[in-house]
Amino acid sequence: MSDDHVYLSLAEGHESGDERWAFGTGFEDPLYGVDTAVPDGVDTAELAASCLALGDDALVSTQRLAEWTTRAPELEEEVALANIGLDLLGQARLLYARCGQVDGTGRGEDAYAYFRDAEDFRPVRLAELPNGDFAFCVARLLVLSSWRLAHFHHLTASPDPVLAAIAAKGVKELTYHRQYAAEWVVRLGDGTEESHRRMRAALEQVGPYLDELFTAYDAQEEVAAVLRQVTQAAGLPFPAGQSLPGAGRDGDHTEHLALLLAELQSVARAHPEATW
Amino acid sequence: MATSQSSRSTAGGAGSDLQEHFDATIALNQRIEPRDWMPEGYRKTLIRQVAQHAHSEIIGMQPEGEWITRAPSLRRKAILFAKVQDEAGHGLYLYSAAETLGADRAQLTEWLIEGRQKYSSIFNYPTPNFADVGVIGWFVDGAAICNQVPLCRSSYGPYARAMVRICKEESFHQRQGYELLMTMMRGTDAQREMVQDAVNRWWWPSLMMFGPPDDNSPNSAASMAWRIKRHSNDELRQRFVDMTVPQAAKLGVTLPDPELRWDQERGHHDFGTPDWDEFQRVISGDGPCNAQRIERRRTAHEEGTWVREAAAAHAAKQATRAHKGAAA
Amino acid sequence: MSTTQHQRDDWPLYEVFVRGKRGLNHVHVGSLHAADDRMALTHARDLYTRRNEGVSIWAVRSEHIAASTRDEKDPFFAPSADKVYRHPTFYDIPDDVPHI
């Protein structure tokens, strides 16, 4: 049998040794060549808080996207939602790592994700809400990715070179997330009576959480422009609604955050001495 | 689909020429491609085999998918998320291969949900402990690779090519599993116990993944002749055991088989007999998680219906608008 | 099933072609389902280029492909630069562990 060795036989007929592995083995380290020293004049406490909050948004969003696994409306959507979740998880890891470098504690990414309690997290509340249906999934994704994209665009000019590099990488990812979400909002708004009704309800649910985003980072103009364009194309009303008092950035959270974290942290906290 | 119609129409006049041409292609170890004439039995057997394989990838997302939200480090979370995503992708590659034979994914999904088509029995076992993620990578993906690597030379072109892509991608699946277990074995006592517990639960079901013993494997002979199966169940099972035993020794875990020993004469490991009654029970629907697995798939498919309909309706409206725009 | 009679919920099949790098032809990599062309491209990106396999994608409805003969119309074959964990060489396995 020429396929005696399960992997070597995959490389048959190829010169280079890497043919037995999957296609495309070039990697880019987003922080390659970036100086991690904090430049003079940068307020490290402010920088750490900013990294932490943006990391929290990404981690909580990833968790919600991961909950879609095996529940997506079509297999192609499984793959798409996982890609978006993995992008955001990658952002969270880089942001937490930067936080640990500048907040004086030297903690690693997992310390922030697994060993902080809910009251120490700072995500915006829109990210915390439970998944709901696919219409809510894409409505939330459209708003959060548009807002985060505007913020990341701004951060590419951050005086901190690491945060600027993280933002530059994130801009590419978020541009795709926004496109994916926008296309789906249009499809669902325009599609059938049922999808129109659900999409409309999803936007109504998102509406009250918008102001909180703009208090955290004022991208009202950019986000409103996207929402106007998309809702017009979809034949949907612009999302509005009485804004909620409080803000996730100030430590005000929905009751859903603690539950989400309890699940996320369950194994890590059951084995605090373990390495994985 | 389009690919099948031409073959079906030629199949109507299937003379001995076509059969001879088909047989010669197989004999020369060349590939059959979608538009080639093929015997109806070959087509049906392949659809069944490829669909079962595709269903296994999709149902196989569930046991590990349960742990993405609870993975105990962000690195493990990313790895597991990407792995389960790959399984969705592999299911898609395989459904696509089945579609080149005239099957239809929506139909195959219905058959899965209705229990008319099967998937690998291994995915009907539960995953109560995070070490299960590692052991699934090591055993289940290891066994899958033993099964699948020979299929990269399957006689049906689209299936063989899907298998090449899948095998290359799955090589990371097995390694991430083994690496997780190595890390856990270097960790706390509780972690080592978790690993051994998972090994004990998954060993025998993994051996069953290769199917019943050769003397009781109803579909094997024709599939071997058609080269859509290239080694017997027992041959592959032996290969898996021989491959895994030294890996277990390195890891420091015990495989739960008192009869396991090296047979110098055969040059292979001897091992005990899996509980084939259990295999029959699980494959015919009475495993620990069968109902739950199918129910999840059914729910996702049914709850996605309005989304898929909406996208199709939007596409139809867009096409009409474009048409009207062009006319005006 | 909950599928209504007049509303189709299965999307048409597309064939996907990927240009692996500049200077190479687009190569058929497989197929997928999508409701429209834009969705076909986003799905193709997510499914067939998640390991950095491409710089350009074509997607075409399978039914629009004209094939030469009844023999051989060939469906099949073929970014995310930081997802190093998708690759087996990312995992540090000692050299003396066989067959992995």
Image: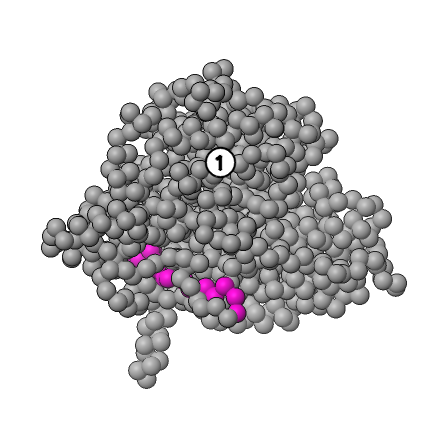
**Would you say residue B112 sits in the magenta stretch?**
no
Q: For the point 83% across and 54% down, which residue is it?
A: A45
Q: Is residue B265 left or right of residue A26?
A: left
Residue type, numbered disc 1: Gly
Q: In this view, does B4 lie to the left or right of A34?
A: left
Q: How crowded is mark 1: few (under 14 residues within 10 Å), some or many (20 or more)?
A: many
Q: For the point 60% across and 52% down, which residue is it?
A: C83
Compared to residue B147, the image places residue A155 above or below, namely below
Of all chains, the one bearing label 1 is: B
Badge 1 marks a residue whose secondary structure is helix
Q: Give the range drawn in magenta.
A: C5-22
Q: Residue A62 appears at what percent x and percent y?
A: 60, 49
User: Which residue is most to the front?
Assistant: B265
Residue C44: tell me if it is visible. yes
Quarter holding the N terminus of chain A?
Answer: top left
Q: Is residue A100 left or right of residue B185?
A: right
**Would you say residue C10 sits in the magenta stretch?**
yes
Q: Residue B261 appears at what percent x and percent y?
A: 49, 18
Q: For the point 65% across and 34% down, which residue is it?
A: B183
Quarter holding the C terminus of chain A?
Answer: top right
- Magenta span dominant secondary structure: loop
Task: Provide the residue designation for mark 1.
Answer: B142
Q: Residue A150 appears at what percent x and percent y?
A: 65, 67
Compared to residue A120, the image places residue B250 above or below, namely above
Q: Which of A46 and A133 is in front in this view?
A: A46
Q: In this view, does B178 lie to the left or right of A152?
A: left
Q: For the point 25% across and 51% down, which residue is it?
A: B25
Q: Nearer the viewer, residue B48 or C90?
A: C90
User: Which residue is most to the right?
Assistant: A40
Q: Residue A118 appears at what percent x and percent y?
A: 70, 42
